[in-house]
Image (cartoon, rainbow, N blue to C red):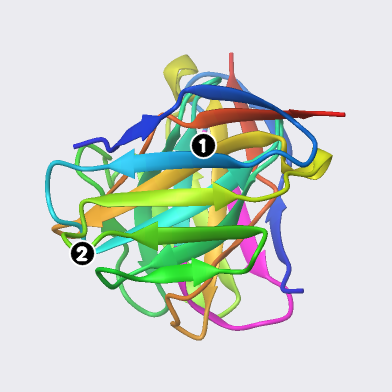
Amino acid sequence: QQPVQSPQAVILREGEDAVINCSSSKALYSVHWYRQKHGEAPVFLMILLKGGEQKGHEKISASFNEKKQQSSLYLTASQLSYSGTYFCGTEVDNDMRFGAGTRLTVKP
Amino acid sequence: GAVVSQHPSRVICKSGTSVKIECRSLDFQATTMFWYRQFPKQSLMLMATSNEGSKATYEQGVEKDKFLINHASLTLSTLTVTSAHPEDSSFYICSAEPGGTQETQYFGPGTRLLVL
């Protein structure tokens, strides 16, 4: 079952923060985050495996809730280079599914 | 950083022909490689997981006889789209996991396939 991502799109000014959410109706084995720029292959950002985990660095980080059904990606003090479509990928029962994506646009 | 290459980057072929796409990890060994497909303006779809020296594991709904995957070495996996049809036109992307760790994966630049 495809995870639900929100928001579908977000427009920010440089320096603003954003949060992208990814949720599943089932407890997940793992959640992955990717960024894809238009016309290019995705770039892997990080994987979270443990409930309650927080990962990343001060600019781009992610959390995985205790129930392992919800993850959030945090983009802090956004830069122009953060623009792109962000996907979460979720793994459950050896099945990998991707969210529909969140289109992030960072403007000067 | 780690580099994964894909070849060709673009291919146009006639309906009924087969197309082979190569995915290479250039500076690391990848025990696991993944193949994805992405239609325009849509999300990624994992097609199969390829482990060196063993048969690929296909996702539900992906025909293994149509999408042949070979992972002959720790640096090379190939995807062959057999008897391609226009509906197979898509962006095919591979990724490679260094040394079997789940902590990261590196994507190839993708192959755009257009079947006429």
Q: Which residue is mark 2?
A: A66
Going by the numbered disc 2, the residue's amino acid type is Glu
Instruction: Place residue A49 in its image quadrant.
Output: bottom left
Q: Is residue B26 above or below residue B28?
A: above
Foreground: B55 or B37?
A: B37
Count of residue discs: 2
- Residue segment shown in magenta: B18-33
Q: Which corner quadrant holds the C terminus of chain A?
A: top right
Q: Give the left or right position of residue B25, taking residue B83 as reference.
A: right
> What's the magenta bit mostly, secondary-structure-wise?
strand
Q: Residue at the location (45% across, 82% down)?
A: B101
User: Which residue in the rendered view is the most extreme toward the right?
Assistant: A108
Instruction: Pinpoint residue B33: horizontal percent, then vertical percent.
Output: 47, 66
Q: Is residue B81 visible?
A: no
- Mark 2 — on which chain does it sit? A
Q: Give the left or right position of residue B72, taking residue B63 as reference.
A: right
Instruction: Pinpoint residue B2: horizontal percent, then vertical percent.
Output: 72, 73
Going by the numbered disc 1, the residue's amino acid type is Ser
As helix, strand or loop, the secondary structure at mark 2 comes to: loop
Q: Residues within 10 Å of mark 1 (few under 14, many from 20)?
A: some
Q: Residue at the location (65% across, 55% down)?
A: B108
Q: Is residue B14 visible?
A: yes
Q: Give the left or right position of residue B83, taking residue A3 as reference.
A: right
Instruction: Pinpoint residue A47: horizontal percent, then vertical percent.
Output: 43, 65
Q: Which residue is mark 1?
A: B18
Q: Which corner quadrant holds the N terminus of chain A?
A: top left
